[in-house]
Image (cartoon, helix red, strand yellow):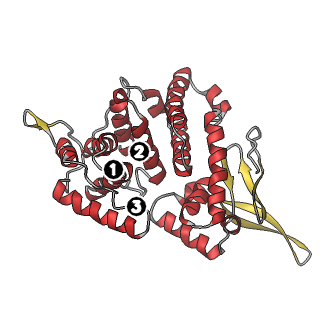
Amino acid sequence: MGGMKRERVQQELVIYRDAKGDVKLRADADKETIWATQAQIAEVFGVFSQAITRHLQNIYKAGELSKVATCSKMEQVQIEGGRRVVRSVEYYNLDAILSVGYRVNSKQATAFRKWATKTLRDYIIKGYAINSKRLQEARQTGVKELTKTLQFIQSAIRRRKLDQTEVDSLLSVIGDYANAWLLLQKYDKDKLILQRGKGKERVRFEYVYAHPAIHALKRNLVLKGEATELFASERDQSFQGILGNIYQTFGGKELYESLEEKAAHLLYFIIKDHPFSDGNKRVGSFLFILFLERNGILFRKSGERKINDNALVALALLMAESNPDEKDALIKLVTNLLA
């Protein structure tokens, strides 16, 4: 199985190998990613290029990824009719490749996910997720806060065996933080400020509203064979209690004033309190997105989602693995991401 060499800035080949042969992809050590054309992605996953085109279009249309951030045109030299021809070809980075992989149900996709899991986990656990040069150039306070964030995420990885989606999502969060030093420097229970938006509530997220939405989600997942009848089955009245908690008041004033605070607590309480027999992280993530969308704060003015699928998986994992005394830090983290 091939691997990525990260000590050199220029691009070099990385080999993905399966039973049918090798696929040569471009490794970009400087940007810490892998680049592949649509044809190469199709070869990796054993499908036609048209299917890759359709999946990529859906990914960008849904706002899961930004094409500007995940696609780059590179020159490719070809010999045509004895002539040396240079053409501009679109290449897609690892985020885009994996997002397509999640949608392709094939043995090749599974093999690639396993390869990516091992590769990404190795870089995270060994501390190579962030380029050492950037760490040396960072201010000392920034290094301390980045180290704290890495340790928090790495501890979550070590405490359990993660699947592909979780590992990739955590790596994505680390990458986002490496480019957002302001958040990193404040990622401390005493320093990170709770962000309160000014959005007006459109929908009050009460049980009579949330329950039918969960039922529809369950029916859809069961039909696709992705959940059992235990999924989203309420254990007691605790789910109704959670919905009441996000609207609780003291002295006639709501404890969680902003929509962002309510959304963050909704996600946290469902994941940590386990009100359902199965699927708490999935239900919590679903309701979190639904709450944001119904109240008009899911998207930025650019049309991009404030928290994409990978970031949401990472947040859900971090909440599930967190200690009770880390609650405030996580709530503040979510509100900052939504700001």
* Mark 2 vs 3, N-terminal side: 3
| Nearer mark to the viewer, of 2 and 3 | 3
188 left or right, relative to 66: left
Residue nearest the observer in this picture, 148 or 10: 148
Judged from the image, the secondary structure of the residue bearing numbered disc 2 is helix
Give the residue at x 89% y 78%: 81
Q: Which residue is mark 2?
A: 316
Between discs 2 and 1, the one toward the N terminus: 1
Q: Is residue 313 left or right of residue 254?
A: right
Q: Name the spot of residue 9 as percent of width and height, x first.
A: 74, 42
Please state which of residues 43 and 135 is positioned toward the viewer in this rendering.
43
Mark 3 neighbour density, 10 Å: few (under 14) some (14–19) many (20 or more)? some
Residue beneath label 1, please?
Answer: 284
Three-letter code for the amino acid on which mark 1 is drawn: Gly
Q: Residue at x 44, y 33 (%)?
A: 183
Gap in angstroms between the C-alphas marked 2 and 1: 8 Å
- In the rendered image, the quadrant that contains the C terminus is top left
| 69 on left or right of 335 | right
Q: Amino acid at mark 3?
A: Ala
